[in-house]
Image: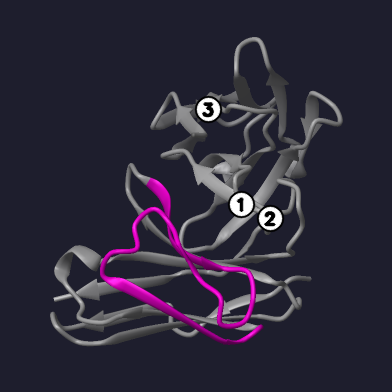
Amino acid sequence: AQSVTQLDSHVSVSEGTPVLLRCNYSSSYSPSLFWYVQHPNKGLQLLLKYTSAATLVKGINGFEAEFKKSETSFHLTKPSAHMSDAAEYFCVVSDGTWEYGNKLVFGAGTILRVKS
Amino acid sequence: DVKVTQSSRYLVKRTGEKVFLECVQDMDHENMFWYRQDPGLGLRLIYFSYDVKMKEKGDIPEGYSVSREKKERFSLILESASTNQTSMYLCASSFSTSGTQETQYFGPGTRLLVL
């Protein structure tokens, strides 16, 4: 079965410093991986997705993630944090067992706090 | 833009009440999903559907049922609400493909409090 572990439940950074949100996955096949963001009182928004085309994936708002098969990791990074990045971030792996499409397995989430 | 709407942002219900949560999408997506979100647990799949009148159980279906009478609408039903069903409920939709790459689009969520 597929699973996702987000290694930090909370991350705190200062504005202008780099962001690193860590994610490890377990999958019995070559997975698709996603990062979603949820701002307070908002729905989930797709940040980026990896679908085996390129291992370094660029997303919206300056975020990117690198797929490392040897480490089973898909960490999310941003060179310089902005106050508006404060939100909860979810690492997500696809469950490839459903014949009609994509069933997702979510990590527990990482809350990012950005200090001014 | 894909639009997924949920009938209520906030709901307060009493224990034992029957509760309906409705979700509508406007992108002609075949697949629709209901999740609940709890702190520290991420999102957990309750039920999902790939076509009208079709449904499949997710990871935590107990205490819930669903209805999909029209392609664009997917309803979550709590037959007899209990306090442990207090949670945020999120609806999502996606196209149906044979791969694992389709993006799911989410609604804003319904925060349900059961007293």
Q: Residue at x 52, y 63 (%)?
A: A42
- The alpha-carbon separation of the residues under discs 1 and 3 comes to 42 Å
* Secondary element at image label 2: loop
Residue at 69% x, 45% y is A47
Q: Chain of mark 3?
A: A
Q: What's the amino acid at mark 2?
A: Gly
Q: Residue at x 37, y 76 (%)?
A: B65
Specify whether residue A87 is in view: no
Q: Which mark is residue A101?
A: 2
Q: Position of residue A104 (x, y in %)?
A: 56, 48
Quadrant (top left/top right/bottom left/bottom right) for the N terminus of chain B: bottom right
**Would you name the residue on which mark 1 appears?**
A98
Of the 4 image quadrants, the one containing the C terminus of chain B is bottom left
The reply to whether label 1 and label 3 mark residues of one chain is yes
Give the mark toward the camera: 1 or 3: 1
Q: Nearer the viewer, residue A13 or B95?
A: B95
What is the span of residues highlighted in magenta in the rendered image? B42-71
- Looking at the image, is B4 positioned above or below residue A13? below
Q: Please report, as a chain letter, where disc 1 is located.
A: A
Q: Amino acid at mark 3?
A: Ser
Residue B112: quarter of image: bottom left
Name the side, left or right, on which B104 lies relative to B90.
right
Which residue is more in the foreground, A85 or B51?
B51
Q: Say which of A55 and A95 sits in front.
A: A95
**How crowded is the residue under tag 3: few (<14 C-alpha within 10 Å), some, or many (20+)?**
some
What residue do we see at 61% from left, 24% from top? A75
The residue that label 3 is drawn on is: A14
